Image: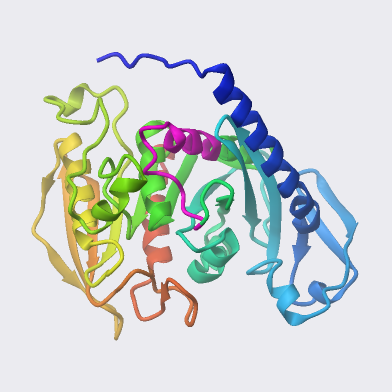
């Protein structure tokens, strides 16, 4: 069925302009302050260095007055570069993490991992919890941390559930604009982009993959709600409890011949704790099943994996033509938290298997298939 294009009204454009202006005004000051290179040593100095694709230049910064102030600047060594992406749904800040010591070959471009935080978090919180930056330094990739504005959601949640008023799609479009903006200024390989998220960020990651399936090579959902299970604020709670049936949007819903899809969905990795009291594990299971059905994939025999004393995982692969379309990892004993995350941080459980390593390994496998490496 052809989807009719709905043109925005003048009043909606006016409201969008006003939102953009307010959010951009708030965002500009942090952008100037945070686009600096920060290390444990340089945080004590009055001069920082910003590395970019074009060269190196000194940037004057004020000396942080306290240890707490220094901790708010960057979670790891390397570049923590700020920017703002604009769209009809408003403006969203983002930070690009560039690992230290990258020595690019002429014309070389790097993979990009987009990381979407959960409710009650910021991009910086998520970076600290997941420690994806340390992995990026070893594996040579860039990490993008978009930031939800509290003007758009008071709890800092991505509005994946606002399907009826179009806000969900608007935010997905802004987030893709952030990816494009970063790719224009830094050595990003747009053929190797993956998106991952926690909780509301996981649901938005799935929505982005559904809206732009040709743009992502892998999608990772950690403790998220099944797509299509909520359409408004009133339906979110039931969806989180696993009481609402999810669905994928056309053309992926109920397709008779998955081979006829012009653009198949990117492979999906689902990580979900089986004692999650905020978002029921039923959502993770349902998401993997829906993703598999849209590609005509069949579930394999579940296996149990465990490394050392970390929580064990029940792993189910859904394959089509011998290739995994979806992988479900149900983590025993994990609640609503990033598995294997930094200790003593909210929404982070260090006793779980390393979700960051699992996410990157999953994405890297798909990147190698794309570029033939």
Q: How many marks?
A: 0
- 189 w.r.t. 141: above or below: above
Q: In the image, is residue 165 above or below residue 313?
A: above
Q: Quadrant of the N terminus?
A: top left
Residue lying at the far bottom of the rendered structure: 309
Residue at 41% across, 46% down: 204
Residue 199, position in %: x, y?
A: 38, 58
Q: Is residue 179 above or below residue 307?
A: above
**Residue lying at 56% horizontally and 66% vertically, measured from the top left:** 125
The quadrant of the rendering that contains the C terminus is: top left
Is any part of residue 299 visible from this angle? yes
From the viewer's perspective, tell me whether residue 253 is left or right of residue 127.
Answer: left
Nearer to us in this view, 1 or 356:
1
Residue 106 shown in magenta: no
Q: Nearer the viewer, residue 28 or 236?
A: 236
Q: Is residue 161 magenta?
A: yes
Instruction: Provide residue 49's location: percent of width, then percent of height.
Output: 83, 60
Say if residue 295 shows up in the picture.
no
Residue 322, given in percent of the width and then of the height, sits at: 17, 43
Direction from residue 364 to residue 75 in the image, left or right: right
The image quadrant that residue 100 belongs to is bottom right
Residue 276: x and y in percent read 27, 69
Q: Nearer the viewer, residue 171 or 318?
A: 171
In which quadrant of the rendered view does residue 296 lie?
Answer: top left
The quadrant holding residue 91 is top right
As drawn, 63 above or below 224? below
What segment is highlighted magenta in the picture? 155-176
């Amino acid at each position: 069925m052809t989807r009719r294009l709905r043109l925005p009204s003048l009043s909606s454009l006016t409201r969008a302009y006003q939102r953009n202006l307010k959010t951009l005004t708030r965002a500009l000051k942090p952008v100037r302050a945070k686009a600096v290179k920060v290390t444990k040593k340089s945080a004590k100095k009055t001069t920082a260095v910003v590395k970019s694709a074009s060269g190196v230049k000194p940037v004057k910064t004020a000396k942080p007055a306290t240890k707490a102030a220094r901790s708010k600047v960057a979670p790891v060594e390397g570049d923590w570069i700020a920017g703002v992406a604009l769209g009809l749904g408003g403006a969203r800040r983002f930070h690009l993490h560039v690992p230290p010591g990258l020595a690019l070959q002429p014309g070389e471009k790097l993979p990009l991992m987009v990381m979407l935080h959960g409710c009650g978090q910021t991009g910086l919180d998520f970076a600290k919890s997941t420690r994806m930056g340390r992995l990026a330094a070893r594996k040579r990739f860039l990490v993008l941390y978009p930031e939800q504005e509290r003007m758009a959601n008071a709890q800092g949640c991505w509005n994946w559930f606002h399907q009826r008023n179009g806000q969900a799609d608007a935010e997905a479009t802004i987030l893709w604009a952030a990816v494009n903006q970063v790719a224009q200024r830094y050595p990003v390989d747009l053929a190797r982009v993956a998106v991952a998220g926690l909780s509301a960020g996981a649901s938005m990651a799935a929505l982005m993959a559904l809206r732009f399936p040709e743009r992502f090579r892998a999608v990772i959902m950690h403790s998220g709600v099944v797509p299509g299970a909520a359409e408004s604020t009133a339906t979110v709670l039931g969806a989180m409890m696993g009481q609402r049936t999810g669905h994928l949007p056309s053309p992926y819903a109920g397709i008779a011949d998955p081979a006829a899809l012009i653009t198949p969905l990117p492979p999906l990795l689902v990580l979900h704790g089986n004692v999650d009291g905020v978002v029921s594990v039923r959502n993770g299971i349902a998401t993997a099943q829906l993703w598999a059905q849209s590609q005509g994939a069949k579930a394999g025999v579940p296996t149990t994996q465990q490394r050392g004393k970390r929580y064990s995982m029940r792993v189910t692969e859904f394959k089509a033509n011998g290739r995994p379309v979806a992988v479900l990892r149900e983590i025993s004993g994990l609640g609503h938290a990033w598995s294997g995350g930094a200790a003593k941080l909210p929404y982070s459980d260090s006793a779980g298997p390393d979700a960051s390593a699992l996410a990157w390994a999953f994405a890297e496998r798909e990147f190698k298939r794309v570029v033939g490496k």
